[in-house]
Amino acid sequence: MINLKGIPASGGIAIGPAYLWTKEELIVPKQVISDDQIATQIQIFEEALIKTRREILDLQKKIADEMGQDEAEIFDAHLLVLEDRTIIEEVISQLKKDKLSAAYVFQDVLRKYVQVFLRIEDEYLKERVSDINDVGRRVLRNLLGKTAKPLEELQEKVILVSHDLSPSDTAMMHRKNVLAFVTNVGGKTSHTAIMAKSMEIPAVVGLEVATLKIKTGDTLIIDGSTGLVFIDPDSQTLESYQRQKTAFKDTTQRFIGLKDKPALTLDGTRVHIAANIELPDEIPSLKEHGADGIGLYRTEFFYMNRVDLPTEEEHYEAYKFVAEAMNPHSVTIRTLDLGGDKFISHLEIPREMSPFLGWRAIRFCLARPDMFKSQLRAILRASAHGKLKLMYPMISGIEELRQANVLLEECKNELRQRKSPFDESIEVGAMIEVPSAAMTADILAREVDFFSIGTNDLIQYSIAVDRSNEKVAYLYEPAHPGVLRFIKHIIDIGHAAGIRVGMCGEMAGDSLFSLVLLGLGLDEFSMPSVMIPEIKHVIRSVTMAQASQIATQALSLPTAKEVESFIQSKLDELEIVR
Ligand code: PEP
Ligand code: MG
């Protein structure tokens, strides 16, 4: 038995077989071929088509058996693409003419084909682009002799082991087949870790050597709460973890009885407990955990795992669905926050030296007003169907906020002209996650309806510690006095200006910090759904006077460690079990 220790990213215990997954980069080099290689390349191409056809038929059969005929029919469209004579003939003639490898030519033809489809003003045809790309990747994989299974095709229940997983890889995983995952790299608040929590699957990141030590088929135990990973455990460890696994289920259920109770302190102060979501299919879970609404809807996941941009209609349908499903509760939609560790290749965001300091979030949106406005119009239109608010990520100063609001006003005017209804008094907020925004909160507060503190980034930027880098994870401390002072400052300034202040970073869902945040006067805590009952429990166990006193004392301490042990001692004193 070997054990490894990494960074606990998403709680829970999983036991099962390992599946080592290597991200395939389908990079096709430009390879010139000689005349006598032409026939072989054509043959390679034809064989790849036959192999792909067989794969699709197998997959179709499996899906039909497991999920039904309707789901399986989706693959008919894939087969049609595969058999498209125009593509096949174009590849063969170009291959003969340019004398380049089949893989290179195929990729080139496919790219042109997709571009033609994207230019057509027809929603149905535009949707075919994802079929073309899906099939294209399969053919390319076969042309390049790659064998790795795509994540969405995992059929057996496995623990995924990978060097890295991007948020888009994670979004593609089928939660029923991935018991847990572990990665070599990553930090507690990397978006992949955040996704694991939303999906309610255990995860350990930052293990550094997981892919070296673990082989496909090894039995693993993953403890997502402590960061421990056991490879081929002995029977004693296995039995002990099997028991703990059952016990963990019981503890997550421990506070579920509070789900319909308000987050009310013993002396009657009410705070709002909301959920963070990445995808609309998390709504049943957040309702089961008793969320008062959605405090952060991360819309960038809508852009992932597709080759085209979502249209205004698609945005609108998704937001309308969420608004209606949550009515009368409010839903705060955050505008696109791409960049940093969230990439999508088709937008051609260049790889940067320091992506978290680069072209991300509102900076990217302001540079692409066409794209940004289609999202803003969709949010506005959906606001006619429920209680929506919108907020901008990564605001660094008033100018960005004003520029975004100018575009928002343009969208409102366009909708008024179109006589398209929307909520004229929709609230607009700014995320406060950049130190310069925190320090100019008084200026920003005059032009927004609310603040939402994004601690994941605020911690990263104020301590200068990359949130997704395991090497510096020891510095990533929410209770750092510098961070606590920022939080106090933002809340005080927000309140002085008469606006509400929420928090939607992971810190809001960590019950160790609830008393301090409550004592500092936070109005809304927004977090992954699973944490909601526990946070309600902590808040319902104190008076506001006690919480304020704890916050004041915590803020006088010099180190994060001392703050944490002080809070723990207070929780013990008050007999609050977490
Ligand atoms: C944050 O930074 O705290 C936040 C909520 O946004 P994200 O994690 O998506 O960057
Ligand atoms: Mg952020």
Image (spheres, rainbow, N blue to C red):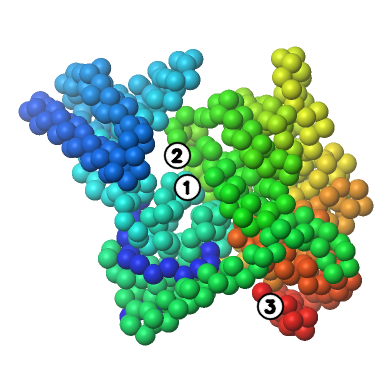
Amino acid type, residue under disc 2 in the picture: Asn
Mark 2 lies within 8 Å of ligand 1 (Cβ measured) = no
Q: Report which residue position mark 2 lands on.
A: 305
From the viewer's perspective, is the residue at label 1 or at label 3 nearer? 3
Give the spatial CA distance, label 1 vs label 3: 33 Å
Q: Report which residue position mark 3 lands on.
A: 577
For numbered disc 2, what is the local secondary structure? loop
317 vs 221, left or right, is right
Give the spatial CA distance, label 1 vs label 2: 8 Å
Screen quadrant of the C terminus:
bottom right
Amino acid type, residue under disc 3 in the picture: Val
Instruction: Give the vertical position of 442 relative to 228 (above or below).
Output: above
For numbered disc 1, what is the local secondary structure? helix
Q: Is residue 570 visible to us here?
A: yes
Residue at x 39%, y 69% (from the top left corner): 15
Image quarter for residue 118? top left
For disc 1, the neighbor class at 10 Å (few under 14, some 14 to 19, many from 20) is many
Residue at x 43%, y 82% (from the top left corner): 240
- Whole-percent x and y of residue 459? 67, 60
Q: Are marks 1 and 2 in contact (CB under 8 Å)?
A: yes
Q: Nearer the viewer, residue 522 or 206?
A: 522
Instruction: Give the vertical position of 490 relative to 126 (above or below).
Output: below
Mark 1 lies within 8 Å of ligand 1 (Cβ measured) = no
Image quarter for residue 364? top right
Amino acid type, residue under disc 1 in the picture: Ala
Q: Report which residue position mark 1 lands on.
A: 171
Residue at x 64%, y 44% (from the top left corner): 297
282 vs 59, left or right, is right
For numbered disc 3, what is the local secondary structure? loop
Q: How many marks?
A: 3
